[in-house]
Amino acid sequence: MPEVLKAPLVVEFPFTRSLGPVQSAFLTGLRERVVLGVRTSDGRTLVPPVEYDPVTAEEIRDLVEVAPTGTVTTWAWNHAPRRDQPLDTPFAWALVRLDGADTALLHALDAPGPDAVRSGMRVRVRWAEERTGAITDIACFEPYEGGPHDGDPAEPARQAAEFENPITGIVAPARLDYTYSPGRAQSAYINALADHRNVGERCPSCRKVYVPPRGACPTCGVATLEQVEVGPRGTVTTFCIVNLKAKNLDIEVPYVYAHIALDGADLALHGRIGGIPYDRVRMGLRVEPVWTEGARYPDHYRPTGEPDADYDTYRELL
């Protein structure tokens, strides 16, 4: 039985966004240990605040302060916290309706165990020691024995304009960790690459050859089993110039990433173009793979020195 291939993969990037006046006020307030909501025209107070009423879609800007105490409406126990979650010990994810709010806020609840958590229990905000203007300024919620208006009095309500140095933008890291296991067709393709070969599969109906193979024809929907070796040379069908350096790639910018139609294939794959100035890469350029020692896939493609391919030979592969 052939080896089942699998590999851990991570998709990660920093998501940068600007903030409107409502979200700016909310995050700036958290930095100052103030929780702000927004009041709708019918008197509801929404926390976290939104810029448009979810019922009427009208714009709302009436910011109000709510208490840092509240009531758990529902919860789920997290017995194995993951990387970058609010707490590194088991905790509850809880929806908490803060006193003065009509909606619930999702955050971590620090409790000794699931038996200590219940819907209807009273909780309060535990503020982070260092606050920067992010939802993590609320370190978590913790059990609280006081009633809706007991405990330390809240600070006087303040409008966003009264906060100094308002938060105008945030950078939220997005990351997805998963284990990828290719199927039969892609496993054969990957194993062939280890021998410096490109292997695709031909559709028994339309006779097109797909590289990388997918196990089924994307046009006809029928299974593909006939293996076909293609390349190694190919033609640049289209390309882009990359000017932003990726932190996990030791490649100087600018460089060119291209779609390359290997000879004998009916689907273009992508690869980096090297061995030529970036401003001389063009559609129709004939290229060949360059392998590094021990690599399972080409490091880049370089010009072969052949005349450029005629546009009509690859226009269907754009």
Image (tube, grey):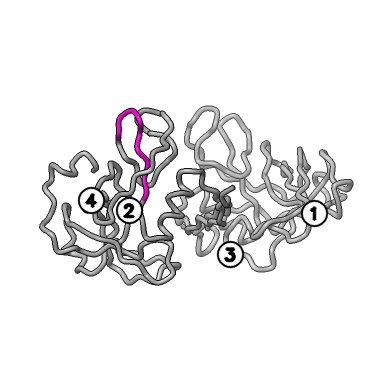
Residue receiving disc 1: 142
Badge 1 or badge 3: first in the primary sequence: 3
Q: Which residues are magenta?
A: 199-207
Type of amino acid at the residue the image marks with label 4: Thr
Q: Dot 2 lies on which element? A: strand
Residue receiving disc 3: 132
Real-space Cα separation, disc 3 to disc 4, in angstroms = 44 Å
- Dot 1: few (<14), some (14–19), or many (≥20) neighbours within 10 Å? some
Type of amino acid at the residue the image marks with label 1: Glu
Badge 3 or badge 2: first in the primary sequence: 3
Q: Is residue 203 magenta?
A: yes
Q: Dot 3 lies on which element? A: loop
Residue 10 visible, this orientation: yes
Real-space Cα separation, disc 3 to disc 2, in angstroms = 41 Å
Real-space Cα separation, disc 4 to disc 1, in angstroms = 56 Å
Q: Dot 1 lies on which element? A: strand
Type of amino acid at the residue the image marks with label 3: Thr
On screen, residue 16 versus residue 257, left or right, reads right
Q: Which mark is residue 270?
A: 2
Q: Is residue 35 magenta?
A: no
Badge 1 or badge 2: first in the primary sequence: 1
Q: Which mark is residue 238?
A: 4
> Quick check: 82 above or below 55?
below
- Dot 4: few (<14), some (14–19), or many (≥20) neighbours within 10 Å? many
Q: Position of residue 82 (x, y in %)?
A: 68, 56
Type of amino acid at the residue the image marks with label 2: His
